[in-house]
Amino acid sequence: MFRTNTALQKEQSHLYELEKKIVQHLPKIQEALNSLKVEELHLKSQLVNQKISQVAASSLDGSVAHSENIVTPDDQTNQQEIDLDLFVNKLQQFDVEIDSD
């Protein structure tokens, strides 16, 4: 029984140290995530502006723009964004678990 308690205390202290390290890294991760979101919005804005100028140019030429030629932002979503969203969800779950303690 004594060994079990000692092992549990060691594991608990190890987990506490890991928690402290994770909490220290959270601001950096959130900053990087925000930076990636800003970059994504900038790229989507550029894409929309490019498509608008293409549609405007083709309509000036007398061409009719078809809606199927316009690329929506969802079509250009980066796979990395999805992976980051999953990571954020895991971090948020972790944060909820900390708050419940």
Image: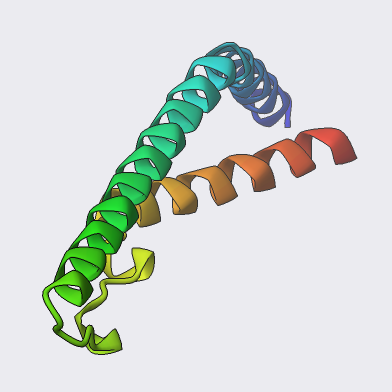
Name the residue nearer the viewer: 90 or 5. 90
64 to the left or right of 41: left
Residue at horizontal 44%, vertical 33%? Answer: 38
Where in the figure is residue 49, as x and y percent of width and height? Answer: 31, 52
- Relative to residue 56, is residue 14 drawn left or right? right
**Residue 13, x across and y down, in percent:** 65, 15
Q: Position of residue 34 (x, y in %)?
A: 50, 30
Depth check, front residue: 7 or 82: 82
Q: Report whether 67 appears left or right of 31.
A: left
Q: Is residue 3 above or below residue 70?
A: above
Which quadrant of the view contains residue 53? bottom left
Q: Split into 4 quadrants, where in the image is the C terminus? A: top right
In this view, 54 is above or below 28: below
- Residue most toward the right? 100
Residue occupying image coordinates x 25% and y 62%: 51
Q: Nearer the viewer, residue 6 or 73?
A: 73
Q: Quadrant of the N terminus?
A: top right
Q: Is residue 32 above or below residue 25?
A: below
Residue 33 image position (x, y, % from top left):
46, 32
Q: Is 20 on the left or on the right of 85, as rendered?
A: right
Q: Quadrant of residue 7?
A: top right
Q: Quadrant of residue 16?
A: top right
